[in-house]
């Protein structure tokens, strides 16, 4: 029994390739490096969105700022 559907293969390869972009995956697909994929459509990846967020600077407590 195959637990992975055809639609999930692009998402699976997106995860395996370290969250590669759709453009990069399309290049690999055109080179024949990603066999058995009919189309590259990742959709919404929450991990990619969180990875592109800006980091918040932490304030230093216990030290006075000298002007």
Image (cartoon, grey):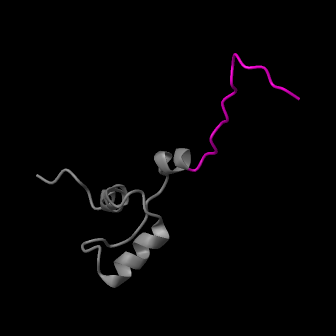
Instruction: Name the one closer to the observer, 23 or 44.
Output: 23
Q: Percent position (x, y) of residue 66? A: 84, 26
Instruction: Name the one closer to the observer, 25 or 55.
Output: 55
**Magenta portion: prevailing SS class:** loop
The residue lying at 43 percent from left, 60 percent from top is: 42
Side of 66 relative to 60 (left or right): right
Instruction: Name the one closer to the observer, 42 or 21.
Output: 21
Q: Percent position (x, y) of residue 28? A: 37, 76
Side of 54 relative to 16 (left or right): right
Side of 7 relative to 63 (left or right): left
The residue lying at 47 percent from left, 64 percent from top is: 21
Position of 36 relative to 13 (above/below): below
The residue lying at 43 percent from left, 64 percent from top is: 41
Q: Percent position (x, y) of residue 11? A: 36, 57
Q: Hey, which residue is sitting farthest right in the picture?
A: 67
Specify the quadrant of the image occupied by residue 31.
bottom left
Question: In the image, which residues are magenta?
Answer: 52-67
């Amino acid at each position: 029994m195959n637990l992975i559907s055809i639609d999930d293969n692009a998402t699976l390869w997106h995860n395996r390739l370290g969250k590669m972009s759709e453009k990069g995956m399309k290049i690999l697909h055109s080179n024949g490096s990603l066999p058995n994929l009919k189309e590259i459509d990742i959709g919404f990846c929450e991990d990619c969105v969180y990875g592109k967020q800006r980091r918040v600077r932490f304030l230093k407590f216990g030290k006075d700022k000298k002007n």
